[in-house]
Amino acid sequence: MIQSRKSRAVVLLSGGMDSTVCAALAARDHEAAALHISYGQRTEHRERDSFERICDRLGIQERLAIHNELFRLIGGSALTDESIPVPESNSLERDIPVTYVPFRNAHFLSAAVSWAEVLGAAKIYIGGVEQDSSGYPDCRPAYYEAFNRVIGAGTKEGGIEVVTPLIALRKSEIVRLGLELDAPFDLTWSCYSREDRACGVCDSCVLRLRAFHQAGAVDPLTYVPVAQNV
């Protein structure tokens, strides 16, 4: 009996932990195409390298890498503006942190929708997470629900859907899911500030380290020794 061909899906793959678990899900269930967008962030070279290596490991052949200068030109974020230091994590902080890149995910999703229309892909995977996150406004369920309405109104056939399989999971649950999927955590990069060894003190590093600890797993990344994290 001839098996039917898998449906197509686009996955936004930054090279981080969450997007890699999404990519593993997309590669398992669909004929996946991976989209990576460099936007002038401090760790863009390391993230791009992670993207390529993760795709190789997951067997994702179709890839598109884009460089978007907009965010570096606009500034306003510690990730894209060298004059704004990346802060150490503060678990008591309630405001949106300076690592927020203004309306970034709308640009990423727009590129993914355009590519999905060309490829005939019906789904776009993105690793948006609301629990145990930095509180970015473009990572909330309501945001993705609204974006799906925009897609329905603004595409030829309106049949493309953004899916967020991790949105309600805690970070430790994402780690456990990734381990079940054999997601290549060893190839990922989460640090906001360094490309050689993870700093261990930025918000992203702290959330990641906590997640692996709570999941009872060992984080395969190398971190700067605590005494040097100054």
Image (cartoon, rainbow, N blue to C red):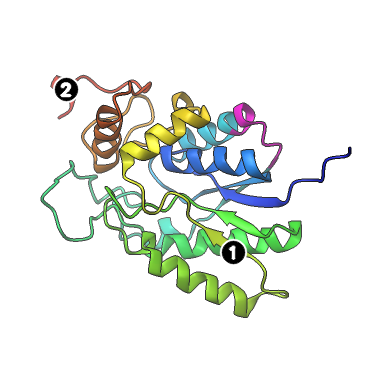
Residue 192 in view here: no
| Lateral position of residue 163 relative to residue 100, left or right | right
Residue placed most toward the observer, 72 or 151: 151
Residue positioned 51% across, 44% down in the render: 22
Residue position for label 1: 161
* Location of residue 197 with respect to 201 vertically, above or below: above
Q: Secondary structure at mark 2?
A: helix
Q: Position of residue 75 (x, y in %)?
A: 35, 59
Residue placed most toward the observer, 124 or 74: 124
Residue 28 in view here: yes
Residue positioned 83% across, 40% down in the render: 3
Q: Which disc number belongs to residue 226? A: 2
The amino acid pointed to by label 2 is Val
Q: Which residues are magenta?
A: 55-62
Q: Position of residue 96 (x, y in %)?
A: 23, 60
- Quadrant (top left/top right/bottom left/bottom right) for the C terminus: top left
- Quadrant (top left/top right/bottom left/bottom right) for the N terminus: top right
Q: Mark 2 Cα within 10 Å, few/some/many (few <14, many 20+)?
A: few
